[in-house]
């Protein structure tokens, strides 16, 4: 067969050669050891925690040594396209402080965008050039098989218990003559272009995955589709050409692609490209509450896989990043503890320290990290974070709760233990913080309140006495002494030692008095220092709430 003639028949419009693109996109001039990495999502706009996990690894690898991290949009499958998806992706990544250096989202004429276009649909000429070259070299051919025929073959293969797919003797279009092909095309038959696989069923490839280590996989033997009927490439072909021409040096991507490596290995080989380093990330796993075993996080079952989940509840993106780094690099946590004030971007991120087995997603661990990181923020930083979240997620409350900035700052100071001997660690995420401090703005009639209503007489007597002794000018210890006085008056112990020695002699002790006041004022049995709360709240609000209990 005259392959050159066939190539011209199939690609009459292709004017360039692979050499043209090789020259157009020369190797990048970067400092030695600098890596070029990318994020290559399809434009669904949906990014989950697993994508963020891989992207953060890619970004760190590029940026720790002055390399490039770019955004390429894999939009060959139009069914999956969602309007505004690219903006969403960039926004979500920016929220987590992950910035691209080039690629989609930058203006076409941006000085850094010289390896574009970065949308695969705009690169069809490039793909056709390379496929034409493969046809010319006898490594690709047109296939006219229709879906129904392929389905029948697959059925037969299933029945014969042999590997399903288009390969070997099943690849019926492999050996069509030039005349047959020409005739089919003239008759208007549609076709795809397939790879003429050089693989052998009894051979393996040994592939060095930079995360998984050495992986042995069977050679690809399938004549996979390179160009679909409409001339648009498949992911396999497009990403190989793009990673090569965009001069990508390392690809960290989801573990679900590991099984496709034999195809990619063959493609890079037949295209004459050097393969970038590949690293396939381990799946994010979680403990299944039902079975007690570990399982993969699933889109369907686990809302925590979606990044929206964290945004809606107001997890601080910095805490998320710290957590993901903890999952990504086993030595990050120790480093971060040792250098708590260092910018986390200074951490010497290393692929070698990435987990081979599934990284275990553990919400308690994430929460501990949030508590810790929040305890390092100032009240102003916390104020800004909460305010931004509330504006977006709780607009009505935002107006009321943030109307008095000083009051909110004082609440935050109290809850964060700012000015106290030790910083408190109560805060985890914005919605939880809102629930913790809500009583400053609304008081609910809750269970705990019902509890003390059982002994309404004592409660009322204690509260009346409290109000009559109350002086807003009292300092914390004067105020507490008054609680002791009330305790003595109503048969509660004011002295804890005396109480412990003979508890049966008392109705309770001074902490029960404090609890009555606490629940009346806040509706809660557990709060930070009550004197401080009362002084943030103000005398009027305190009296009003106590009065309401007495009247109730
Ligand atoms: N477009 C592929 C995806 O969204 C990217 C895979 C890769 O990073 O090579 O999963």
Image: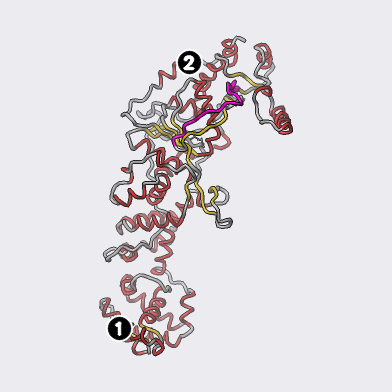
Q: Is residue 16 above or below residue 365?
A: above
Q: Mark 2 points at which residue?
A: 17
Q: How many marks?
A: 2
Q: Which residue is drawn at 50% across and 14% down?
A: 15
Question: On residue 151, which mark appears?
Answer: none
Say whether marks 2 and 1 touch (CB < 8 Å): no
Image position, residue 165 (x, y; %): 65, 29
Count residues near mark 2 (Cα–Cα under 10 Å), then give few for <14, some for 14-19, many for 20+: some
Which residue is under mark 1?
482
Calculate the distance from the C-alpha at mark 2 to the C-alpha at mark 1: 91 Å
Which x, y percent locates residue 23? 40, 18
Q: Earlier in the sequence, mark 2 or mark 1?
A: 2
Residue closer to the observer: 459 or 136: 136
Q: Does the residue labelled 2 lie within 8 Å of ligand 1?
A: no
Q: Quadrant of the N terminus?
A: top right
Question: Is 204 a magenta residue?
Answer: yes
Q: Can residue 302 be seen in this view?
A: yes
Instruction: Indicate whether residue 500 is drawn in magenta.
Output: no
**Other-residue count near label 1 (Cα within 10 Å), few / some / many at <14 / 14–19 / ≥20:** some
Instruction: Write down the quadrant of residue 114 in the picture.
Output: top left
Q: Which of 477 and 57 is in front in this view?
A: 57
Which secondary structure, mark 2? loop
Give residue 291's position: percent from left, percent from top.
58, 55
Residue at image position (48%, 79%) is 451
Kindly indicate the quadrant of the structure image that contains residue 37: top left
- Region of the chain picked out in magenta, as a range: 193-210
């Amino acid at each position: 067969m005259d392959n050159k003639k066939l190539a011209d028949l199939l690609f009459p419009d292709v004017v360039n050669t692979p050499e043209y693109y090789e020259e157009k996109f020369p190797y990048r001039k970067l400092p030695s050891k600098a890596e070029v990495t990318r994020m290559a999502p399809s434009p669904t706009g949906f990014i989950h925690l697993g994508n963020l996990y891989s992207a953060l690894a890619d970004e760190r690898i590029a940026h720790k040594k002055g390399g490039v991290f770019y955004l390429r949009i894999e939009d060959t499958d139009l069914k999956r396209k969602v309007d505004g998806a690219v903006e969403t992706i960039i926004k979500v990544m920016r929220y987590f402080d992950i910035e691209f250096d080039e690629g989609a989202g930058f203006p076409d004429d941006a000085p850094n965008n010289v390896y574009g276009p970065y949308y695969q649909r705009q690169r069809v000429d490039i793909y056709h050039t390379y496929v034409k070259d493969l046809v010319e070299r006898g490594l690709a051919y047109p296939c006219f098989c229709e879906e129904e025929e392929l389905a029948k073959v697959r059925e037969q293969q299933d029945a014969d218990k042999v590997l399903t797919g288009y390969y070997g003797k099943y690849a019926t279009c492999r050996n069509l003559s030039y005349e047959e092909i020409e005739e089919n095309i003239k008759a208007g038959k549609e076709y795809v272009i397939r790879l003429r696989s050089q693989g052998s069923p009894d051979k393996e490839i040994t592939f060095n995955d930079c995360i998984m280590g050495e992986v042995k996989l069977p050679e690809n033997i399938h004549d996979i589709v390179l160009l679909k009927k409409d001339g648009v490439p498949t992911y396999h072909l497009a990403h190989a050409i793009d990673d090569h021409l965009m001069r990508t040096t390392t690809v960290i991507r989801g573990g679900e692609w590991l099984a496709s490596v034999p195809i990619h290995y063959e493609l890079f080989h037949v295209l004459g490209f050097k393969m970038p380093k590949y690293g396939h990330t381990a799946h994010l796993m979680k403990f299944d509450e039902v079975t007690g075993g570990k399982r993969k996080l699933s889109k369907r079952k686990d809302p925590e896989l979606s990044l929206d989940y964290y945004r809606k509840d107001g997890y601080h993106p910095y805490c998320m990043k710290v957590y993901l780094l903890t999952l990504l690099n086993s030595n990050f946590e120790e480093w971060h503890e040792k250098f708590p004030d260092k910018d986390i971007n200074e951490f010497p991120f290393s692929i070698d320290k990435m987990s081979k087995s599934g990284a275990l997603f553990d919400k308690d661990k994430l929460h501990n990290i949030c508590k810790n990181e929040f305890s390092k923020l100032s009240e102003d930083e916390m104020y800004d974070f909460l305010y931004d979240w509330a504006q977006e997620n709780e607009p009505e409350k935002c107006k009321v709760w943030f109307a008095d900035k000083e009051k909110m700052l004082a609440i935050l100071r109290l809850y964060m233990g700012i000015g106290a001997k030790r910083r408190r660690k109560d805060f985890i995420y914005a919605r939880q913080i809102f629930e913790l401090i809500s009583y400053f703005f609304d008081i609910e009639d809750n269970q705990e309140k019902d509890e003390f209503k059982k002994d309404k007489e004592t409660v009322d007597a204690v509260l009346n006495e409290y109000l009559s002794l109350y002086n807003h000018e009292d300092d914390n210890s004067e105020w507490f002494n008054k609680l002791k006085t009330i305790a003595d008056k109503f048969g509660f112990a004011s002295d804890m030692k005396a109480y412990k020695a003979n508890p049966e002699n008392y109705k309770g002790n001074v902490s029960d008095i404090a609890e009555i006041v606490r629940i009346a004022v806040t509706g809660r049995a557990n709060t930070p220092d009550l004197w401080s709360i009362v002084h943030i709240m103000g005398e009027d609000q305190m009296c009003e709430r106590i009065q309401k209990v007495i009247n109730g």
